[in-house]
Amino acid sequence: MPTIYTYGVTASLHQPNWRAFLGRPPLPASSPEEVDALAQTPTLITGAGGSIGSALALRLAHWAPWRLIFLESSENNLHKLQQAWMGEMKARSGAAVAEATLLGDAGDRALLEEVFAAHQPRIVFHAAAYKHVPLLEQQPFAAIANNVLATATLAAVAAEHGARIVLLSTDKAVQPASVVGATKRVAEEIVLACGGTVLRLSNVLDSSGSVTEIFARQIASGAPLTVTDPSVRRYFLTMDEAVDLLLGAAQPDSSALLAPALQADHRIVDLARFMARELAPHRETPIHFSGLRPGDKLTERLWDDDEETCPAARGGLLSIRPVRPEAARFKSDLAALCVALRERDLPAALAQLGVLVPGYRPSETVLALAQNDARRMYV
């Protein structure tokens, strides 16, 4: 989060004391032995220019002889990553090597074939995804294409080349009420079906586009803080914890489906008040409740009612036993979803999402789009 200099706001806007807000000890960090166990493995990071992808990339810069390949679809984010990476390289000798920094789509099969042939990655951290719930409720085809179809393409190419995927998923995939959650739940099953690992993360503090970034900008501008509902609660992680969890999930003996071992969630309104105290302690910052948006839920969960949990081999992680669909049926349903996407048939696409994710309940926004789409198709 960039520092924003505005009268009455602390200049260290990007560094609130998150530990004071969380009120818990940090989750266990990755040990040097765990990192060394991976360090000689050629590693591809998709979405490498995003908040978590770049944080992971810059953490791995500290270890040699790590061979890293970065793939990012945003030119601006890729440029920022290049600049940050060069800064790390100037500060360190004998650091990891960036074998390739590529501008492209994680669902571009031709590009992926080139990447795997040239660099032979053996671990893929798949962080590329669309995540903004209200926006994607208006753009369901984009969510399906990026979160489902691109993941399926990447998983297929990785399997052909003997690579293992670690999918960065989300608590929104549990009992999903949004297109983002439903598409990430399908992405989870795609990765599990090919022998990969899924890590469901909760909200990451200080990440790009997160509620903390929104609150920071509102505080800087002197605007009221906007919270959807006073009862909304979320689980939170720091960025360092998210990276450590990803490194733990990448260990060869990790369980297939993992989540952070978090005991308590937090009210978003408490986060808003905390940030106001931290960043503008000498002025009163009002809070405005705007109402839940399409796809929003009051609370999120890290596992479903029919999923069993137990402590994982590594501290900070829970192992989840997923309920898996029958393989042939899943493959057929996924193919039908891809056909609906190709034909731009939204009613059919939503119907297939419902088949693939039985707990998914589309919002009124998405249902209205589907009704309009059906009228256009059959007039």
Image (cartoon, rainbow, N blue to C red):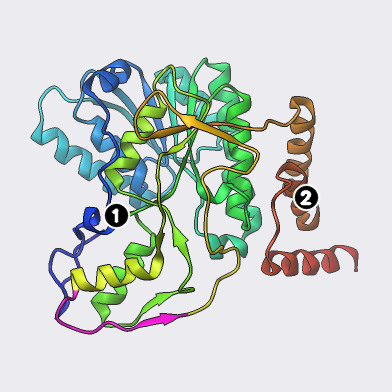
Q: Earlier in the sequence, mark 2 or mark 1?
A: 1
Q: Is residue 235 above or below residue 184?
A: below
Residue 267 lies in magenta, yes or no? no
Mark 1 is surrounded, within 10 Å at the Cα level, by few (under 14), some (14 to 19) or many (20 or more) other residues, namely some
Judge by depth and name the residue closer to the eye, 45 or 233. Answer: 233
Three-letter code, disc 2: Glu
- Residue for point 26% across, 68% down: 275
Q: Amino acid at mark 1?
A: Leu
User: x and y percent of residue 280 in the render?
Assistant: 18, 76
Question: Residue 354, image x and y in percent?
Answer: 75, 49
User: Could you tell me what secondary structure mostly forms the magenta stretch?
Assistant: loop
260 to 213, vertically: above or below? above
Residue in the image at 55% along x and 65% along y: 134
Residue 286 shown in magenta: yes
3D distance between C-alphas at marks 2 and 1: 46 Å
Label 2 belongs to which residue? 343
